[in-house]
Amino acid sequence: MTEKKSSPAVNVTKILVGVFFLAAVFFPLFSLLIKLKDADLEKIFSNPLVGSSVLHSVLVSLAATAISVTLAFILAWCMARTRAALKPLFNVLLILPMLIPSISHGMGLIILFGSNGRITRLLGLSQGIYGFWGIVIGSVMYSFPVAYLMILDILRYENAAPYEAAAVLGIPKIRRLTAITLPYLRKPLLNVVFATFTMIVTDYGVPLMVGGTYKTLPVLMYEEVIGRLDFNKGAVFGTMLLIPAVIAFFADMFCKNRANSVVTKPFVIAKKPLRDALATIIAALMSAAVLYPIISFAQLTFAQKYPIDMTFTTHHIESTLDKGALGFLRNSVLIALAVSVLGTVIAFISAYLTARLPSKSSRLLHLLSITSLAIPGMVLGLSYVLAFKSTFIYGTFAILILVNSVHFFSSPYLMFYNSMGKLSRDLEAVGATLGIGRFRMILDVFIPTLRSTIMESFSYFFVNSMMTISAVAFLATAKTKPVSLMITQFEAQVLLEAAAFVSLAILAVNLILKGVVALVKKLAKLR
């Protein structure tokens, strides 16, 4: 699509969207970085705990990333390249962990493998799974669904035509792997690895629960800012956490993708009983591993006193509700709905401006739109504290809506950007020829065509806003607190039964939303 001179309305819209990103992303980041001048860097880095925390973060992130991506590739291959039974069911079960906060996965490990865990006592183990391996396993549980969905998407859109041509020419399978598969997978898999590593290295939920004395940098940052209100030190740690995310950001931008993204022929999966049975067994085992911690939440919620007295009771639910859980759940739902609407509208507008109206300013706007990919939630939350603590939005729902909209913006934006890029390049020209205005084209053509993407964007914003802790931990007040923050509150008070109930409540709300979205999409297809 050739660059054309934009109308004044388009230019004004681009300026407004650009100003939004400057105010909501770059101004807070600048406030964080400028805080570094007040920090005693020599004293901070002379503390051996800082160095060990950085090393711990790198080690657990490397190990968990390797395991998570490997498992995700195996499961994605089973779903995309075999005729395994019960695929729709497995696809739902395998993504359940991404519908609850990461700290809940750490809590699930404590229930099962802690010092008094069910499996620990069943096997007669002398100690729980705290420290390095506890963090690794919890991080795999937390990051696996995201890596799985990314790889599954890659495999679903791989073109079968080159493989069929290679088979006709008698090219050996090992040569097809090196000449076709690896070049296609190189950049997408690199993106998956970097995205997974960044998720894990910046997470504090799992290490906070099962790390014990094995501290990671995000946990150290959380303790310094929440516990000691040391914002100068928090700014230093936050800047350090930006480094891996920024590396991943630029690696994604500059890594060349040599794969052909045009799918001319989808894969036809032949029936192979042994392979399909093995794939079904693998998917079933992984689904069971995913489900067991969630089932344990339900058992824990209704236990009188875990693990001493497992008698059925509703006391913990009643106690949690008495502590204001319904009000905080209402806060979470209202915030999630507002973020979903605001985020989806801005993501749609930004993607339209960058994908359909190419220009130098559009390329700059595209760069602004994907910048939040490189900002961890904890860093963004602390940045907002430093930037907006003296403004009228601080301590209100508005700042929570804004930070979540920015935190989760880039992925929905890229959904719209990629979808709009696949539409005919001549739509605007045809509309102009017929005298149809740009706004009418958006209402009558783009929105109906991208209905599925709009629903997916809405769902993405909602689910992540419901379960996020990192971005809002520094910003919520007693009146605006989301229900997810009750998990950290109960964990600190060793009220695991109450924390388990909150985790189940978040999961239930997200499952309802996912069900509603699936129903709306199905009804839209029937029309």
Image (tube, grey):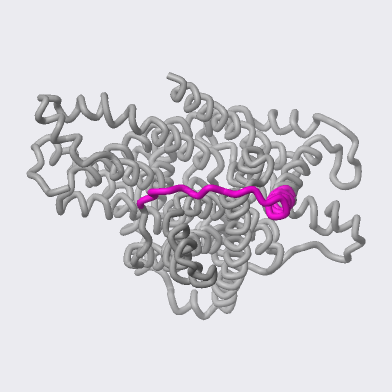
Q: Could you say where residue 4 lies in the image, as x and y percent from the top left? A: 9, 45
Q: Is residue 188 above or below residue 328?
A: below
**Residue 212 included in the magenta stretch of the image:** no
494 relative position to 74: left or right: right
**Residue 282 included in the magenta stretch of the image:** yes
- The residue drawn where x is 48% and y is 21% is 523
- The residue drawn where x is 48% and y is 71% is 178
272 relative position to 400: left or right: right
Label count reads 0
Q: Could you say where residue 186 lies in the image, as x and y percent from the top left? A: 44, 66
305 relative position to 140: left or right: right
493 relative position to 334: left or right: right
Q: Is residue 516 above or below residue 109?
A: above
Let me know if residue 238 appears in the view.
Answer: no
Q: Could you say where residue 263 lies in the image, as x and y percent from the top left? A: 39, 49
Q: Nearer the viewer, residue 266 or 216?
A: 266
* Image quadrant occupied by the C terminus: top left
- The residue drawn where x is 48% and y is 35% is 459
Let me know if residue 196 appears in the view.
Answer: yes
Which range is magenta? Answer: 262-284
Q: Nearer the viewer, residue 311 or 277?
A: 277
Q: Is residue 268 above or below residue 68?
A: above
Q: Is residue 27 above or below residue 177?
A: above
In the current view of this chain or complex, which residue is farthest to the top?
527
Q: Nearer the viewer, residue 39 or 480?
A: 480
Q: Nearer the viewer, residue 425 or 247?
A: 425
The quarter of the picture where residue 352 lies is top left
Q: Could you say where residue 119 lies in the image, as x and y percent from the top left? A: 85, 55
